[in-house]
Amino acid sequence: MKFFLLYDDKTRLYWLLSSQATDSMVRLTHISEARYNLPNNERHRLQLHFSRNCIDWCFAGLVAAGQTERHARNYASMAVDGDDLLVLCRSGDDEGRNPQYTNLITFHRVKEFRNLVY
């Protein structure tokens, strides 16, 4: 997944949307062909982080997750709308060709996202 960065003037923080790898140490012989022999090529979990310096990142939460690896959530974009964070991403379900070539665009709202800062 490509990542998306956004700077929020109000918190003076950078916000990052990216895929969350949950099994990057798995053997290539045990992963699906849809991952193109890349153990870290998981696309079904979209996570949010924040940082003051773009080096040290803090996990803020999970924005969206597909039911299976085939239900991808990737190539996301985001924008601030008042106190909320709006997220648009390319998504897939059982009708999608594979996690790379998906069939949906989904919209997600992270309400009061600034409250996720710790």
Image (cartoon, helix red, strand yellow):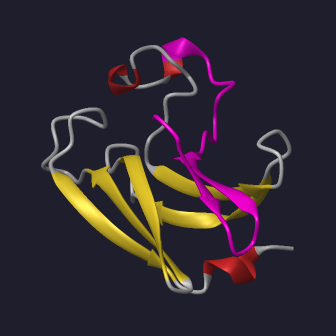
| Relative vertical location of residue 83 with respect to residue 24 in this rendering, above or below | below
Q: Residue at x 70, y 75 (%)?
A: 10
Image height check: is 27 above or below 96?
A: above
Residue nearest the viewer, comparing 105 with 10: 10
Measured along the vertical axis of the image, is residue 54 above or below residue 38?
below
- Residue 39 appears in the figure: yes
**Picture quadrant where residue 115 is located:** bottom right
| Magenta segment includes 9 | yes
Residue 65 makes an appearance in the image: no
Q: Looking at the image, which is closer to me, 47 or 111?
A: 111
What residue range appears in magenta? 1-29
Quarter assignment of residue 96:
top left
Q: Measuring from the top left, give residue 94's x and y in whole percent.
A: 19, 51
Q: Residue placed at 51% from the left, 21% from the top?
A: 30
At x 35% / y 47%, what residue is drawn?
Answer: 72
* Quarter of the image where the C terminus is located: bottom right
Residue at image location 56% in from the left, 23% down from the top: 39
In terms of image quadrants, where is residue 56? top right
Say left or right for 53 vs 78.
right
Determine whether, in the image, residue 118 is placed left or right of residue 9: right
Q: In the image, 103: left or right of 35?
A: left
Q: Give residue 16's position: percent from left, percent from top.
A: 61, 51
* View extreme (front): residue: 9
Q: Position of residue 36 (x, y in %)?
A: 39, 16
